[in-house]
Amino acid sequence: MGRMTRPVAACAAAVLLSATAPAIGAGAAPAPRIDLRVLVLDDKGPATAAITAELKGSGTPYTTVDLTASGRSRIDAAFLGDTVDGRPRAKYQAVVVPNDNPFGDGSAEMAALVAYEQRFGIRQVDAYTYARPAVGLGYPQNPGYIGSLDGRTAKVTAAGESGPFGYLGGSVPFEDNDPAVTESYGYLSVPLANQAEGATFTSYVDAPVPGGDARGALIGEYAHDGRRELVVTFVYNQYQSQFRLLARGIVEWATQGIHLGADRNYYAVHVDDVFAGDDRWDTELNCTPGDVDCAGAGDDVENDPIRMTAADARYAEEWSTDHGLTLDMAFNGGGSEAYKDENGGSDPLARRLLADQGSYRWINHTYNHPFLGCVQDTSVVPWKCSTGLLGTTRWVGPADITGQINDNLSWAGRNSLSVDRAELVTGEHSGLKTLPQQPSDNPNLAPALTLTRVTSLAADASREKEQRTLGPATTVPRHPMNIFYNAGHAAEQVDEYNWIYARKSDGGSGACEGSANTTCLNEPLDTSTGYASYIVPLESRIALGHVLSNDPRPHYLHQSNLAEDRIAYPALEKVLGDYGRLFADNTPVVNLRMKDIGEEMRRRAAWDAALAAGRVTAYRIGDTVTVTAPSGVRAPATLPPGTRQAQSGSGTVTFGSAYAGLRSGWAAPGALQSRITFTLAGSAVPADPSGTASAARAAKPADRLPVPAGVRKPVPYGPGDATRA
């Protein structure tokens, strides 16, 4: 039994976080106001771009100054601070600079920046700088190292574990995707044995110096002259896993764990076509019989569809429980009924999955998995949308769409299967625009979603990465895993993979040649070993990259991948295994259901729009934080443990939830409240610098540092890595 074949606001502002300023005694200088915004002095290099991307992705407010622009803002006292209501104000809570001294000796701008940091206790991140005494390190020689860091493994030191990188498990591996390309570059040197008076260097992340027992710092804190700098001695881009691992700690160090925005590691896996069968790849024809583009398959070709068994279902339940990951089962009830019709009225797979239904989350995937976009004309390859007499597109009608949605819900009801009707995955994400043949949505889809009360609609993130609205629903883009729906055996997966990604000269289709969105295999994979040795490591790295990027979008594969050779599990296990080795127990993967992912994305979009419109103001005075934003917009925040939120009356509650050693969450006013007060625990309040710090020492600016090709232009992991290609 084969499943259906696959042709190819309101204007008023509301105070969300608010606090009353500490009382100022007679004659006492008022506590400064520190605005919760990061200043990025951008040299257009990959390191500052990477930190900017982390701030943007987490929703942390920031301001950039393009240091390469001739008409840029000048960095002076007026740019950095002023006075508000008689209280001194620091306009930025942290500063990111390309290197430790981007302006040069005698620069008025550097002097202004130093004085600002000293006065308000503002921290500075040196995004990528040369190891030398000016940053508390010896020159990288005797012992020391200068060069590629590809394939090396750095370690978080004891100070790093108890400090800003305590969310990591200890190891920080550096990528080495292409041996022919240098992808990372840096300097390893030890802290100066004799620091300047009052100065200290604390190493947070280090690596062994080749040829000896010494360990050279890659990230460390240099405290001197009343200032603190985070010294980073290697270059990176926003996609590299070593940066993704360290990005959270860099921001938390700079902001002292008090900032707007939040960063978590999300991982959800959707399994499509549950109860149905998936048509099988034909290794001789190099296509899938039943598909419109499989021209060599006649009516006599047996497809031999792939369908899970009861044993596969039992394994899935045990695997999910053992690995602590709840799978989301997108089901087609009609597949079970068709199987019963062909097998004496019995479906052991359905019995097993329904008995274990509490181990999963369930998503409506329509009853029979039909194409719900335009009416397809499959007389041509590739297919096209059928048209009427006047040349207008013919669309699948609203009754057909609502019927598929409701029939599947009715099947679930008859079988006592708990499903949230707000969530929907259409067959092949059909109904949504499908380029190039169908450049617009089926106009009947939105009304059908209204009638069936769908508010979360799955989309394909490889086609549409951003969320959008369709009628009452918002889309939830899903990352497709490059593990094919028509493969139940590893050898089939590799054969099809070779066909897609090998050059014509190597027996492949050649589709990869000349494409800007993919890469070719250097040589075809061995069908007996290539899945485990190449595809599993590649797909797990790509998926883990999404997890480390604060990306809540789910990944999806198909029930066929849980059947026969069960080829999905090795990739999923590697993602979870690698994650477990990289992170501490206080930073688990966050496994959300589809509608909650959609809500997370909706909140982010509203917050980002408010930031872009300049409608967010945030600052800290002493132990209190105040944020204003448009009415109805929730504010994401990351705050220290012990932070309390005031409720109506005199009560308080703990803010947010624990993650990566801090508290984070979305803030909104309570009932009948016009503002919310967050109070930091006393031990978490940054020290208020008193007096005037010593004058800044003269320092030679860092030279333009080497940036290898693999950092300037990210090296793709391999075929299927569309992000870096």
Image (spheres, helix red, strand yellow):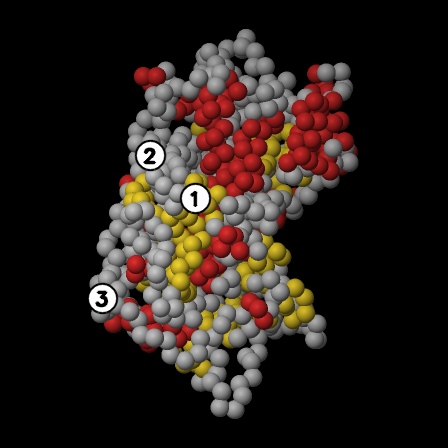
Residue 488 shows up from this direction: yes
Q: Amino acid at mark 3?
A: Asp
Task: Say which residue label 3 marks.
Answer: 105
Which secondary structure lies at badge 2? loop
Q: Reading the chain from its start, which is encountered first: label 1 or label 2? A: 1
Q: Residue at x 68, y 35 (%)?
A: 321
Which image quarter holds the N terminus? top right
Query: In the image, residue 207 lies at what x, y percent?
Result: 40, 45
> Marks 1 and 2, Cα distance to the nearest angstrom?
33 Å
Query: What residue did someone put label 1 on?
Result: 154
For the residue pair 547 and 377, the one nearer the viewer reads as 547
Above or below, 482 against 33 in this view is: above
Residue sitting farthest toward the top:
300
Q: Earlier in the sequence, mark 1 or mark 3?
A: 3
Q: Which residue does the numbered mark 2 point to in the structure image? A: 516
Q: Is residue 543 above or below residue 92?
A: above
Residue 632 image point, x, y percent: 57, 64
Horizontal arrangement in the rendering, residue 607 relative to residue 236 (left or right)? right
Neighbour class for label 2 at 10 Å: few (<14), some, many (≥20)? Answer: few
- Label 1 sits on a secondary structure element that is strand
Q: What's under tag 1, amino acid-wise?
A: Ala
Q: CA distance from mark 3 to mark 2?
A: 44 Å
Residue 130 location in percent, x, y?
A: 29, 53
Left or right: residue 279 compared with residue 191: right
Specify the label residue 261 is tagged with: none
